[in-house]
Image (cartoon, grey):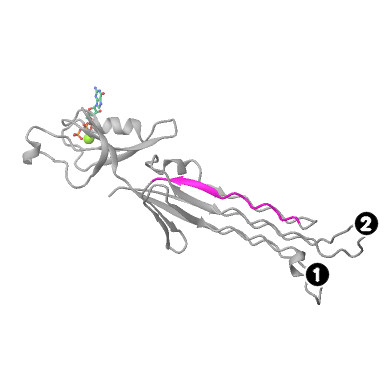
Amino acid sequence: MFIDQVKIYVRAGDGGDGMVAFRREKFVPNGGPAGGDGGNGGDVIFEVDEGLRTLIDFRYQRRFKAERGEHGMSKSMHGRGADDLVIKVPQGTVVSDVDTGEVIADLVAHGQQAVIAKAGRGGRGNKRFATSANPAPELSENGEPGQERSIQLELKVLADVGLVGFPSVGKSTLLSVVSAARPKIAAYHFTTIVPNLGMVDTGDGRSFVMADLPGLIEGASQGVGWVINSCVTLSGRVLLCM
Ligand SMILES: Nc1nc2c(ncn2[C@@H]2O[C@H](COP(=O)(O)OP(=O)(O)OP(=O)(O)O)[C@@H](O)[C@H]2O)c(=O)[nH]1
Ligand SMILES: [Mg+2]
């Protein structure tokens, strides 16, 4: 089975710090604590997008950071929470932690989401620490740091397009030109005896998997020559015949 894999780094947003502040109003002396809470950071979330076929986009961007929460403010104003960072992945992506090997998520269904890095919570402002014993606390919390981790994405690849044709018609050559795959190319029949797969980037944000298959000759279905066998599963819609 051909596996497309890539290692990336993700970091969730830190929580905003809580604030120490006091109410200051013209005719109200010692107005009491008024420091707001920090906002929560953003999670890093993966979401399955049926339209994606490969992990090719992660070749170009390997670091992802969600925003931090805003700090708390005076006048009891809370900091704004950050938006989550939602990253689209293809169906069938398995996400694991590089350091521990633990599988974090197995993303199979369209629209399925998983939190991959958990955001830091915002810290509490001093208003929250007021008690009858200490009505004017000079105390606030810092925001928690967002989780950061190195992760591995793995996708078991089924081909979308298969190249079917007589031996030596240039199937492997075509694959080598449109993808980064480097199949063996030679001027004798049956150079290719097991399928080669390559990722084809269409240049407009899409990609698909092309399979270069062993050459077929007349009688292949009766077992003559090399027959397409269980090595490759064509999930796909197109067979290109040469
Ligand atoms: N003249 C010419 N030769 C080509 C072209 N494409 C491939 N070739 C040559 O044809 C020969 C066979 O090419 P391959 O790409 O290995 O053919 P294949 O269909 O993969 O062959 P098998 O794996 O044996 O089934 C090689 O010597 C290539 O250099 C082409 O467009 N024009
Ligand atoms: Mg070939």
Residue, far bottom: 133
The image shows residue 200, relative to residue 119, as above or below, that is: above
Foreground disc of the pair 1, 2? 2
Q: Is residue 82 left or right of residue 6?
A: right
Q: Quadrant of the C terminus?
A: top left
Disc 1 residue type (three-letter): Pro
The outermost residue toward the front is: 27
Sort mark 1 into few (<14), some (14-19) or many (20+) by Cα contacts within 10 Å. some
Q: Quadrant of residue 41?
A: bottom right
Distance, label 1 to label 2, CA atoms, is 21 Å
Residue drawn 81% across the image and 64% down it: 33
Q: Which residues are magenta?
A: 77-90
Q: Nearer the viewer, residue 62 or 126?
A: 126
Q: Position of residue 207 (x, y in %)?
A: 38, 36
Query: Left or right of 231: which side holds 26?
Result: right
User: Circle 1 is placed at which residue position?
Assistant: 137
Q: Is residue 120 at all visible to an observer of this figure?
A: yes
Q: Is residue 83 magenta?
A: yes
Residue depicted at x 6% and y 40%: 222
Residue 224 makes an appearance in the image: no
Whether residue 90 sits left or right of residue 11 in the image: it is left
Residue 40 screen position, x and y as percent: 63, 57
Query: Which residue is outermost to the right?
Result: 27
User: Which residue lies under the disc numbered 2?
Assistant: 26
